[in-house]
Amino acid sequence: MSWSVSDVAMAWGAIRPRNPLIYHITNAVAMNEQAHVMLAVGASPIMSWNPLEAGDLTRACDGVLINIGTPTRESAEAAFVAVEEARSAGKPLLLDPVGYGATALRSELTERLLESGAPAIVKGNGSEISLLAGAGGAIRGVDAVEAGDSAKAAAGVAKKFHCLAIATGKDDYVSDGRQVWAVRGGHVWLKSLTGSGCWAGSLVLAAVVSCGDELLGSVAALVAFGIAAEKAASISRGPGTFRANLFDVLSSLTPGDFEAAGVRWDKRQVL
């Protein structure tokens, strides 16, 4: 499978006219910013941990994002309601296993959600995906310490759980279990903004829902995020101004920005 820069730009550009409603069961640290980033790119966010409305919201939305960054009894119960409803309704669901491997609770919660078979996409940092694949890796709190071979890990998770897997890092890797796409780009200041990986998950799901292609939408969102980070850094003084400029740039990316950046991805065989 091969895409042109125009294909990737069009997949990203599908978000604003589609205006997808993305239901987030997400963490308290990143929730506001995920809502802001969704609005910036033309998607509509709704956030709720309440299991009493999780079924209704799943049926009403275009896609569901579950992020376990600050797990609570209520959010876990809502997540299990949502995965059952998403599976029944055929709604795309992205799972972000934040801090997988850091505690027994996070690991068990992630594994139970994956066993449901509902997640179409699993997105984590290199360490989280490596640990899920059984390929090593290390976590300190919720941050990646050691990731191992993220490309192989993404392929391993995709095969193991029959999903699309994304491992983020200096380079991002997207795998369908047969092949891996490496996506280059970004800026070191993203590491200075808590929740930036969570924002990436929201962008991926919005693009996937809007363009109708899990693989192309994922690559397009990661490419766009990398381009936006680089453009924002070029006009910023530090992480604070970078954050504000990043939202501005995300809201105004054009096909010309993609053309100027060129091809940021390549396909690799899984060894």
Image (cartoon, grey):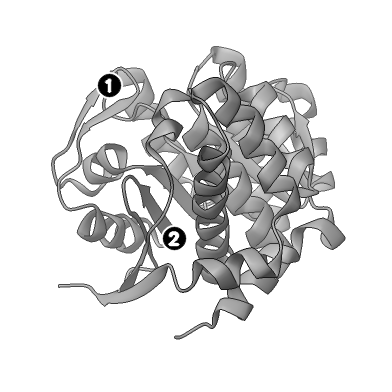
Q: Secondary structure at mark 1?
A: loop
Give me the residue at 44% from left, 60% from top. 163
Give me the residue at 67% from left, 49% from top. 86
Which of 182/115 is in front? 182
Q: Residue furthest bottom?
A: 1
- Quarter location, residue 191: top left
Depicted 133 relative to depicted 155: above or below: above
Can residue 99 be seen by looking at this rendering? yes
Q: Is residue 182 left or right of residue 59?
A: left
Which of 214/81 is in front? 214
- Quarter location, residue 243: top right
Q: Secondary structure at mark 2?
A: loop
Q: Is residue 114 left or right of residue 47?
A: left
Label placed on residue 163: 2
Label placed on residue 102: 1
Mark 2 Cα-neighbour bin, 10 Å: few <14, some 14–19, many ≥20: many
Give me the residue at 56% from left, 77% from top. 5
Q: Quadrant of the C terminus?
A: bottom left
Mark 1 Cα-neighbour bin, 10 Å: few <14, some 14–19, many ≥20: some
Residue 104 x/y as whole percent:
29, 20
What amino acid type is highlighted by mark number 1?
A: Ala
Residue 192 x/y as whole percent:
42, 24
What amino acid type is highlighted by mark number 2?
A: Cys
Residue 155 x/y as whole percent:
28, 62
Give me the residue at 80% from left, 52% from top. 20
Depicted 176 relative to depicted 54: above or below: below
Residue 10 x/y as whole percent:
69, 73
Depicted 81 relative to depicted 169: above or below: above
Which of 113/68 is in front? 68
